[in-house]
Image (cartoon, rainbow, N blue to C red):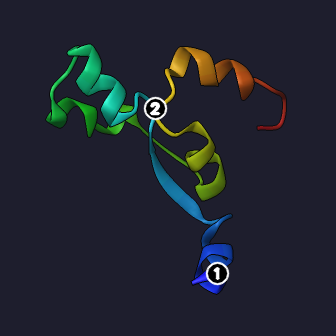
Amino acid sequence: MSDVYYLFTDKPNLHHIFPVNFIKQSGIATQIESDSLMNIAYLSQITNWKISDKNPLDYLKEYDQPGL
């Protein structure tokens, strides 16, 4: 299991910019809208896990750096 974990940590991973749970709790969109291509980005798996279900207004500040 650990071999697989480390193998995929830097591979592209689908990320919901507005996390599904965040959208569900806020009631601002439906499941279909949360899966819209406008709400999807590719990130490394590690970055995706670090972001988790955070509010995008909070986590985007952390990643607003040159070269990212």
* Discs 1/2, front: 1
Task: Identify the residue shown where x is 52% and y is 22%.
Answer: 56
Closest to the observer, 21 or 32: 21
Disc 1 to disc 2, C-alpha distance: 27 Å
Query: Picture quarter containing residue 31?
Result: top left
Q: Is residue 62 above or below residue 32?
A: above
Upstream in the sequence, badge 1 or badge 2? Answer: 1
- Give left or right: position of 47 versus 34: right
Density class for disc 2 (Cα within 10 Å; few <14, some 14-19, many ≥20) is many
Quadrant of image for the C terminus:
top right
Mark 1 secondary-structure assignment: helix
Q: Which residue type does callout 1 highlight?
A: Ser
Task: Identify the residue shown where x is 20% and y is 30%.
Answer: 33
Q: Is residue 55 above or below residue 4?
A: above
Query: Picture quarter containing residue 19?
Result: top left
Task: Identify the residue shown where x is 51% and y is 40%.
Answer: 52
Q: Position of residue 24 (x, y in %)?
A: 24, 26
- Give left or right: position of 26 versus 13: left
Query: Picture quarter containing residue 9?
Result: bottom right
Query: Which residue, as the protein is rendered here, is positioned at the far front?
Result: 1
Quadrant of image for the N terminus:
bottom right
- Where does label 1 land, which residue? 2
- Where does label 2 land, which residue? 17
Mark 2 secondary-structure assignment: loop
Q: Which residue type does callout 2 highlight?
A: Ile
Q: Position of residue 49 (x, y in %)?
A: 57, 49
Density class for disc 1 (Cα within 10 Å; few <14, some 14-19, many ≥20) is few
Task: Identify the residue shown where x is 28% and y is 15%.
Answer: 26
Q: Position of residue 23 (x, y in %)?
A: 29, 24
- Give left or right: position of 9 versus 31: right
